[in-house]
C-alpha cells in the first residue's frame, strides 16, 4: 500500500527520529511512502524507508526535481506550490502526520475530506485524527483502519 507521511519541514531531533522510524516500519512492511519530498519529516521518513528497503515518492511543490531530498526514489515535480498538498494525500490510502505547521494542517484537512485514516504524532488537534504515542502505534493504526 501507499501511505502518505506528512509533517513539518523544520523539526526537532525527536520528531526527525519519529518520522525516520515511521519510514523504517512502513518500508519493512512493504508499503510505499508518499511525501512532499523536501526536508524535515519528509527527509526523515524517506531515509527510514530507504534503510528498510522501501520505495519513496516525493511530490514536490516546485518545478525542479533536484530539490528533492537524497532519499526520494521517485520524484514528481509539480510547480504547484502548496497546492500539491492535495496530491500528497490523494496518492496514499492513509496518512501519518508528524508535527507540522499550516501546510500539514491543509494536508490533514484533505486527508479527512478524502476519508483517509490519519494517525497523528504530536500534530494538530483535529477531529478525525487518531492521536498516537509512537511510530509503531501510528503504523499499526493506519494498517488496521484499511
Image (cartoon, helix red, strand yellow):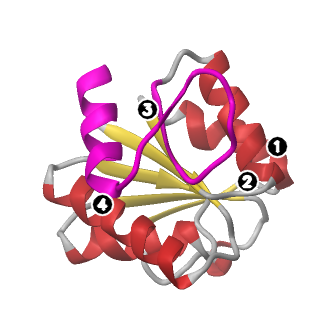
Decide if residue 82 is on the left or right side of residue 140. Answer: right
> Dot 3: what SS?
strand
10 magenta-colored: no
Q: Identify the image quadrant of the C terminus.
A: top left
Q: Judge by depth and name the residue closer to the eye, 125 or 113.
A: 125
Q: CA distance from mark 2 to mark 3?
A: 21 Å
Q: Looking at the image, is mark 1 or mark 4 earlier in the sequence?
A: 4
Establish if 105 lies above or below 44.
Answer: above
> Horizontal and vertical percent for residue 50?
28, 73
144 magenta-colored: yes
Decide if residue 125 is on the left or right side of residue 140. Answer: right
Residue plotted at (69% across, 44% down):
124
State yes or no: discs 2 and 1 in contact (Cβ < 8 Å).
Answer: yes
Question: Tag count in the figure?
Answer: 4
Q: Which residue is label 1 attached to?
A: 83
Residue plotted at (54% across, 55% down):
35
The mark found on residue 55 in the picture is 4
Q: Which residue is label 2 attached to?
A: 78
Region in magenta = 117-146
Residue plotted at (23% across, 58% down):
25
Residue 34 visible to an observer of this rendering: yes
Residue plotted at (62% across, 22% down):
112
Q: Looking at the image, is mark 2 or mark 3 earlier in the sequence?
A: 2
> Dot 4: what SS?
loop
Q: CA distance from mark 3 to mark 1?
A: 19 Å
Q: Which residue is label 3 attached to?
A: 94
Q: CA distance from mark 4 to mark 2?
A: 20 Å
| Residue at the extreme front | 133
Amino acid at each position: 500500500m501507499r501511505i502518505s507521511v506528512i509533517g513539518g519541514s523544520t523539526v526537532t531531533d525527536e520528531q526527525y527520529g519519529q518520522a525516520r522510524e515511521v519510514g523504517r516500519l512502513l518500508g519493512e512492511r512493504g508499503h510505499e511512502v508518499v511525501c512532499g519530498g523536501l526536508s524535515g519529516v519528509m527527509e526523515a521518513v524517506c531515509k527510514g524507508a530507504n534503510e528498510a528497503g522501501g520505495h519513496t515518492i516525493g511530490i514536490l511543490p516546485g518545478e525542479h526535481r533536484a530539490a528533492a531530498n537524497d532519499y526520494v526514489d521517485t520524484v514528481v515535480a509539480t510547480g504547484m506550490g502548496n497546492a500539491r498538498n492535495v496530491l500528497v494525500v490523494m496518492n496514499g490510502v492513509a496518512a501519518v502526520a508528524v508535527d507540522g505547521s499550516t501546510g500539514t494542517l491543509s494536508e490533514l484537512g484533505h486527508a479527512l475530506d478524502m476519508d483517509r485514516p490519519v494517525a497523528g504524532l504530536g500534530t494538530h488537534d483535529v477531529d478525525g485524527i487518531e492521536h498516537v504515542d509512537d511510530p509503531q502505534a501510528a503504523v499499526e493504526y493506519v494498517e488496521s483502519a484499511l
